[in-house]
Amino acid sequence: MSDHWHEECGIFGVFGHSEAANLTYLGMYALQHRGQESAGIACSDGKVVTFHKEMGLVADVFSEEILSRLAGSSAIGHVRYSTMGVSELKDAQPLVVDFEEGSISIVNNGSIVNAYELKRELEAAGSVFQSSMDTEIIIHLIARSRKEQIEDRIVEALKQARGAYSILFLTRDKLIAVRDPHGIRPMALGRLKGSVGGTVICSETCALDLIEAEFLREVEPGEMVVVSSQGVETYKPFMPAADRFCIFEHIYFARPDSVIGGRSIYQARKELGRQLAREHPVDADIVIPIPDSGVPAALGYSEQSGIPFEMGLIRNHYVGRTFIEPQQSIRHFGVKVKLNATRDVLSGKRVVVVDDSIVRGTTGRKIIKMIRAVGAKEIHVRISSPPTCYPCFYGIDTPSRRDLIAATHTLKEINTYLTSDTLGYLSVEGLHACVPQDRSYCDACFTENYAIPLGVERTGEQLNLFRKSINICSPGDRSARRGRGE
Amino acid sequence: MSDHWHEECGIFGVFGHSEAANLTYLGMYALQHRGQESAGIACSDGKVVTFHKEMGLVADVFSEEILSRLAGSSAIGHVRYSTMGVSELKDAQPLVVDFEEGSISIVNNGSIVNAYELKRELEAAGSVFQSSMDTEIIIHLIARSRKEQIEDRIVEALKQARGAYSILFLTRDKLIAVRDPHGIRPMALGRLKGSVGGTVICSETCALDLIEAEFLREVEPGEMVVVSSQGVETYKPFMPAADRFCIFEHIYFARPDSVIGGRSIYQARKELGRQLAREHPVDADIVIPIPDSGVPAALGYSEQSGIPFEMGLIRNHYVGRTFIEPQQSIRHFGVKVKLNATRDVLSGKRVVVVDDSIVRGTTGRKIIKMIRAVGAKEIHVRISSPPTCYPCFYGIDTPSRRDLIAATHTLKEINTYLTSDTLGYLSVEGLHACVPQDRSYCDACFTENYAIPLGVERTGEQLNLFRKSINICSPGDRSARRGRGE
Amino acid sequence: MSDHWHEECGIFGVFGHSEAANLTYLGMYALQHRGQESAGIACSDGKVVTFHKEMGLVADVFSEEILSRLAGSSAIGHVRYSTMGVSELKDAQPLVVDFEEGSISIVNNGSIVNAYELKRELEAAGSVFQSSMDTEIIIHLIARSRKEQIEDRIVEALKQARGAYSILFLTRDKLIAVRDPHGIRPMALGRLKGSVGGTVICSETCALDLIEAEFLREVEPGEMVVVSSQGVETYKPFMPAADRFCIFEHIYFARPDSVIGGRSIYQARKELGRQLAREHPVDADIVIPIPDSGVPAALGYSEQSGIPFEMGLIRNHYVGRTFIEPQQSIRHFGVKVKLNATRDVLSGKRVVVVDDSIVRGTTGRKIIKMIRAVGAKEIHVRISSPPTCYPCFYGIDTPSRRDLIAATHTLKEINTYLTSDTLGYLSVEGLHACVPQDRSYCDACFTENYAIPLGVERTGEQLNLFRKSINICSPGDRSARRGRGE
Amino acid sequence: MSDHWHEECGIFGVFGHSEAANLTYLGMYALQHRGQESAGIACSDGKVVTFHKEMGLVADVFSEEILSRLAGSSAIGHVRYSTMGVSELKDAQPLVVDFEEGSISIVNNGSIVNAYELKRELEAAGSVFQSSMDTEIIIHLIARSRKEQIEDRIVEALKQARGAYSILFLTRDKLIAVRDPHGIRPMALGRLKGSVGGTVICSETCALDLIEAEFLREVEPGEMVVVSSQGVETYKPFMPAADRFCIFEHIYFARPDSVIGGRSIYQARKELGRQLAREHPVDADIVIPIPDSGVPAALGYSEQSGIPFEMGLIRNHYVGRTFIEPQQSIRHFGVKVKLNATRDVLSGKRVVVVDDSIVRGTTGRKIIKMIRAVGAKEIHVRISSPPTCYPCFYGIDTPSRRDLIAATHTLKEINTYLTSDTLGYLSVEGLHACVPQDRSYCDACFTENYAIPLGVERTGEQLNLFRKSINICSPGDRSARRGRGE
């Protein structure tokens, strides 16, 4: 409850608009929820690629002056939340390199599961690595391809990579988007309105809305979109594979106003709340969300159950900044810094508390105690997703299994730990019934049914280890880590 | 709609706790919504007063290291939103001075209406001023008093000042709180739990909640509370006056989880929404708030009217930081940077949009156009307060009358400007019916019924002018101004 | 040797030039050696006074953008090296206040010896103090004067103050300079060349040189210069007193290229070196200076003695910045970070080492050991000033007597401590013979012959104590203290 | 005159000392004159390599806290002055990469002349480049070598590279130094004193002096020194080549207290001054240097000629920081900000002005006009090196030929441009006679006799161009460029 898994990345690209860098800046701002640790933009004016990246939030990294130096009519941008404990400038994207055919820049949302083997092979062939990004591996594969066309090089490279990826490449004169054959991470295609026009490809439709671009369609699983002065071309170069869209995008990752599968995430979340009410009804006085992510599901639960919806927890709007709790303090204030329980809303009430998921349970326990402390009579926790028992290897920052409370405890034990009166999780079947039916989903975090097999002999934890052979303190490390602004 | 008047200040003081500075820091963090431009703390260890103040948010101004240097068991703190166009370090509080009896520090939430006359008189008697703060005038009056006791000096000084004030004074060995006889701005008294104990006096109860202090009661209008090692003493040194508590604290300024008049602000705002539904019913499909401040009233409206509540506008959680829109941009994105309208919630719907107030109307107009653009069929604006027609001179940052749309336009004209289908404001009577009945209120911003008469020959604008004779560019001026984090 | 007393302040003012702030910025840059801890400029455009001050060096405090906001054709500026251990923004100058007659700004180089009594009297009359600056006392005296003309108020105020001062006042329409009757600190009057013209008054002529202003003459002891649109007027409002110009300006404080008493400081210092050679000849192979301040005296010594001059010590040009020696280091590198001894210049040589003064002797001892370590056969220390035995109360940052090695040790003991072979100080008579003969001097630091009597019952140390009743941590405190860039 | 060519880099490495990072920090501080734009350290604790690099001066880039995170007993460090117009973080060193055998870090002082060809070949073989550093090419060559031992890989890589290089490699357990066969850039070997011991290899002996390490000998041209727990081994793996040490290190680049060829640079420069006096005597009253770099040669000139030495130009000790001249200023102050001419030293005198070199001549012209303006009767310019007519391709930042005044003008024309009375350059023969005779020299900047042939078809300018295909704005770009602190 309210400590969340984190999306690793958001991507944005634009081609054919004189204000490419400004639009990318705005698009990344709309995608900030997908990554808060670093931000970067690469721009091409048809001849020279210019870029800037730094640790920090989009609004802090880019000034008017820096944007004005990013010249050209095509650009790609990236926001990042690292999977590792330490985030570092060297791992910020875009990655911009020179290779045989000139400059190429890349941004990626996803994760390559055979990265370890590929890196080993490339090193054996004489490649050197300056970061721990999967994305650097893809660049090496492209550089080593003997194909002539950049599109063919990209395809040859990605055929060797197994995993989840939604990638944008920027060359001198092209913007190329590729989504992995399973379509694990989202990717939307849009068109700028007005006479200037321009093509936009990005993680979520909320970025299109901000810049007033028209949403055309999602980039399809396994599709490659090539945008150039010749127009927009599309290819399906990969072996077709089963749709396995990340179902957690519907539960938590995507922004409520984004549209996926023809429906807003907000509506999907309300439906999850309704289903939750059907599966886990309870006799109670009020339904309250954990703000803000639990709001749509709580509204759905309220609608279905007829129990009134209230904002029983008020959040401090300034949390999410660099608040440092005094360490010498005699108390640990924890979640109170973010949320406060309103006594006269909760006192004497039987309360349904709705949230989207539980990771460790520690924050949830504190919230329940806080609600109890202002006089709630009963507390019924309802979670609008199934228990999260398995880590994700496809681009999400998840703790190891032993830290997932649902992986190591029974429902009853979790309820006891949370100090709630009752606890109800949504069923896997219920979950699938609420999301758009136009595709199938990866739900491995609930079912261990991984879309893409991992290497036989290596676990995700081992994967992380090998990435850390270089421990780089780059400038940005000094900046405090900032949480998601909720 | 969603461009607001701004509270000028929040204050916090603690006496008798070894972690006085840390507690003050946390308390100011909870009061951050009352002022975002500067923050300061003064501390006394019984011998020496130490202080730190800077432009910026509480979490940015204070580091662990700075807090550790603020030694002592009593402290006062201040957050500020300037009334002037330019905010300056010289006007940040606490104001700390040496005078005949030693050091005295002061923080204030309020405004002195006869500041101009008092400053003139003091200057004629040889006083010099280093800031444009009213508060500096009070310090001079105290220093010039011939009384022996500091309490008597304070009373003598404040008897000369007319206006709204909730002041905390910190001397070497006392914390003294004074609230003006009309009790215009709020002030709460609390006690720290646990064996260490300690007394807390602050603007709102939400600050008590965060540090887990018990809320005892409000400081009464005209009351002086003196906290020392002798305990807590209380006085009523001023001529009794009519209660005139700021009714706008209930509408917008205070935090929803704060308790005033025995009830949470959240409940008062829901009641305003219910009353609004009674006064201005409409046949519609959904009720949506302007997030976040319009949420409680929209819930109340929904409850009373039976029309379903939806979150039709999604806000970007990262707004409120230093986002700079690229100036050379071909479009102005304005409110879209903060809010996005969810098409499948709003399309084809008759929508009731609830907000707490309208200042200029420019933002509201943009929001309504955004809702219309995603297909809303009808848009009915409902405001949970009466039209704001008159500026406030008691500690609120209000534009001049000509910029208040309700001061210069009829209801019909405002509706036309907003491009809404219908528009309804709460009545003054309705407003008074919804707020706690244990006191009377200042509602001059709606009625021109000012609690305290202004100088005959001077308007508020003239008042502002004289304050600006020194135009200081202090260090903090370079930091970008940050809006309220909504 | 090479740990020095520090000048407290440099001042600069200009009247009647459209680029007043820019010229002041440049002038302060030239006077940076007189104070490195804070810098500030106040500007008047005839109506409004604007100012900016911050902790730090001139070049760091002022940006193009800040300078552009300092509008008007008259300005004053200040650089400061605090006398107290902690330097604070609240004590930075200019001090800008509103008083009965409008705004007045002040910068001062000097120190008031009866500050304690005056502050007491002013506080008893109801004045409040926001800083520990003497200068704030002067402003209060001016504000309390019942005279009508600002010039008369200034004279009345300064007649009550005993001490050293070279002050510039800036009002809306006048620049007023006053130098104390003894003329302890320097003050030069110049005229800008070119058709625009303009009058400049500043601490040293090197500031005039930089902005290509013509040096007219020194402001005389006890003189008041009033610059307005009416031209430049001069007054002698004070009781005449004996000239007591600070002789240490010739020895170390002033820049070598400044002219005082009709001769460059460089020539005076060379003459001190020649006299030193006459008083303390020695049979040696080379003369080396402690760079850079010892260079002119070493050249003089070499010239007089015929012993060749060499640069045996090479200094690191990047010292003086914020170099922090790693604390966990096993060694303390001390002066080696600043200076390195050149082995093949010094090895096997009998070396005369010339410096201008010795304060504690600790640095000198390290330098001598360093010279010995590269093989010098004999080391003869020659100091171009008499032993400094008494603290200065007239605007110089001096340690207490017990830290002055010459105050507590015999010549022989100092020589032993330094580990030099011989040690020679210039005589007081020799010193007086070398400086311009057009005036008499204050040499109290050598002779205890104080120009102005201190209060009977208070020592300088007590004076410092009372100033510290407010212990303010202002923003600048966090910036590391920077030494003089030598 | 006093606008100089710039050394590109300084390097420092230490092996076998528990405070490796601290010692490297100090060593880089001593080598700061060799590069002021970026600084970096990489450290190995035998298992993990940690590093930090940033734009800025050593003292600004490294804090106590960052140093404490750089753990291990071996380290390498680098200071850099870019050859390109824009300096960028991506080109800062050390370069740290993962390759087949683990991590390797590299710092280099020098330049590879066949970089363009090598990069082309590597790209054709599939390598990607993330910077414009020559050094990245060397790393690729090492990674692609099929040798087993890292030493053999390094040799194989460097055999393909033609140019000047003094390189340090840091692996998990070794520090490896290589100097190019011509020995163009300097490299010194030292041993830490004390029981802890440790080996140091660095650009100049002044870095050894600061950390109190003993100077053992120079690393020889073509030598490879391998330092490990097995001790210090030495190899000569390259084809022997003629000594071609950079003669300009003696004229300007190296610090005066460094020892090269058994003698201090200071002594060499004095000898250049003496030879200059022999070749270009003149009847004059005083000899003055352009401080500080001209001082030793001026002393030599004075000694040989018997004309008295004076410091006629005084420099502002605070120059070299980020001084920004106000752009809207009516005057350009230029060199006056750095230097001031002392009237009573120069007035009426026949002055010999000594400097080490002339690049464009623009600064020299201003200095001569300044000297003339204070009344000098005659000005005789004497340069302690021959005319610089050809750019350097071996690690020095030189302008293109058309900007070298001596490349495009006769001696007479230069004299006219400078407005001097006479002008004398040292002869090439004279220069060679003054420097240590134990080696031969590269003097291509005077003679076009390049030590290493450049590519047939490419000039240095073309070389620069190809490096700029990626135009990166990395974080450090915003920091103002700082000049050498003179």
Image (cartoon, coloured by chain):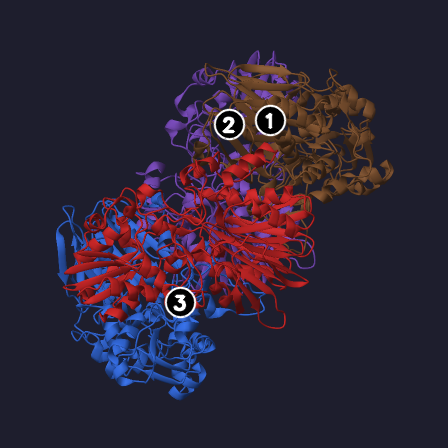
Chain colours: A blue, B red, C brown, D purple
Give the label on residue D357, or none: 2
Instruction: Residue type at mark 1: give it.
Output: Leu
Q: Secondary structure at mark 1?
A: strand
Q: Circle 3: is it few (<14), some (14-19), or many (20+) Cα within 10 Å?
A: many
The alpha-carbon separation of the residues under discs 2 and 1 comes to 44 Å
The alpha-carbon separation of the residues under discs 2 and 3 comes to 71 Å
Query: Which of pointers 2 and 1 indicates the residue nearer the eye?
Result: 1
Image quadrant containing the N terminus of chain C: top right
Q: Secondary structure at mark 2?
A: loop
Q: Give the answer, above or below, for where A366 lies relative to C454.
A: below
Q: Nearer the viewer, residue C482 or B334?
A: B334
What residue is disc 3 on?
A314
Image quadrant containing the C terminus of chain C: top right
Report whether D233 appears left or right of A264. Answer: right
Identify the subunit bearing mark 3: A
Q: Position of residue A217 (x, y in %)?
A: 16, 63
Q: Circle 2: is it few (<14), some (14-19), or many (20+) Cα within 10 Å?
A: many
Report whether B485 appears left or right of D428. Answer: left
Q: Position of residue D45 (x, y in %)?
A: 54, 64
Identify the subunit bearing mark 1: C
Q: Circle 1: is it few (<14), some (14-19), or many (20+) Cα within 10 Å?
A: many
On the same chain, marks 2 and 1? The answer is no
Are discs 2 and 3 less than 8 Å apart at CB? no
Give the label on residue A245, or none: none
What residue is disc 1 on?
C168
Rendered image quadrant of residue C484: top right
Q: Give the answer, above or below, for where D26 lies relative to B350.
A: above
Q: Secondary structure at mark 3?
A: strand
User: Could one spot residue D61 in this view of the protein?
Assistant: yes
Instruction: Residue type at mark 2: give it.
Output: Ser
